[in-house]
Image (cartoon, rainbow, N blue to C red):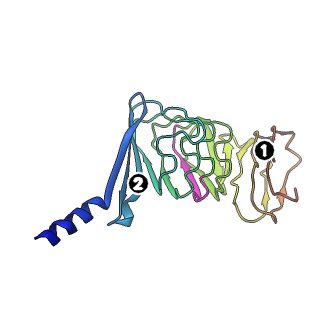
Amino acid sequence: MLLFVCMMTTVWCFAQEQSGTCGENLKWSLIHDWNDFENFGILTISGTGEMTNYGYNESPWYGKAIYKVFILEGVTSIGDNAFYGCTAMNKISLPNSLISIGIGAFCWCSNLKTIFLSRNVKKLSGYAFDYSFLQSIEVDNVNPFYSSEDGVLFNKNKNELVSYPQSRAGSYTIPYSVTSTAPHAFSYYSSYDCLIEFPSSVKNIGENAFFGSYLRTL
């Protein structure tokens, strides 16, 4: 009987949930279930309204093992530096209620390979993906503010290249419709052997467009 109780206690301790608030009307919960690795390191954010803006290393889940993030309907913003340093995160789901993504929101999310911007995202702040090493940025087709082609992020009219994924493989020719690139559009690009061709239509290159980039040829 004693052995049975100890075993039950051990199993119970292997499932852990942490929770708290991350906005006036937002809550977060983080589950680590050592008995079910499909449900290990899942962060869920729920409620209504805006998320708190954080400084570096200040989010309540910073430094915790997070592999998947689910932001539920009702959340309207991702705060500054919200997922800064979440290096294990490999999946995130964004709700249609989301409107803005803060400064450095996904900085150093080095295991996140792709992100899908939902239909109502209209504000993508600077440095949002720095050091993220994304391979692809996708956008809901009905989003009126942004678009994506071959995994590259543009404004809706495709006359501005907004963000080039930092780990996108292969050479690339910018579409002739593009007349400008946004600030930090190619910052921290990590490939040494990529050739990016600029058409003559590009007249303006944003501030620090190639900051920290390993690009060698343009």
Which residue is drawn at the image coordinates 68% and 38% (left, top)?
126
Of pointers 1 and 2, the one earlier in the residue sequence: 2
> Callout 2: 10 Å neighbours few (<14), some, many (20+)?
many
Query: What label does residue 42 carry, if any?
Result: 2
Q: Can you tell which of label 1 and label 2 is closer to the viewer? A: 2
Distance (Cα) linking label 1 and label 2: 39 Å
Left or right, 26 with reference to 183? left
The three-letter code of the residue at mark 2 reads: Ile
Q: Quadrant of residue 35?
A: bottom left
Check the image and name the residue furthest to the left.
1
The three-letter code of the residue at mark 1 reads: Val
Q: Is residue 193 magenta?
A: no
Q: Where residue 4 sits: x, y (%)?
A: 15, 70
Q: Quadrant of residue 165?
A: bottom right
**In front: 56, or 112?**
56
Check the image and name the residue furthest to the top.
24
Left or right, 136 with reference to 63? right
SS of the residue at dot 2?
strand
Tell me which secondary structure the magenta stretch mostly adopts. Answer: loop
SS of the residue at dot 1?
loop
Q: Where residue 96 sits: x, y (%)?
A: 46, 40
Which residue is drawn at the image coordinates 54% and 50% (left, top)?
116
Left or right, 123 with reference to 5? right
Give the magenta-colored segment's residue range.
109-120
Quadrant of the frame with the C terminus: bottom right
Query: What label does residue 3 carry, if any?
Result: none
Check the image and name the residue furthest to the front.
2
Which residue is drawn at the image coordinates 33% and 50% (left, top)?
17
Q: Where residue 43 sits: x, y (%)?
A: 42, 49
Left or right, 128 with reference to 32? right
Position of 202 relative to 189 (above/below): above
- Residue wearing tag 1: 178
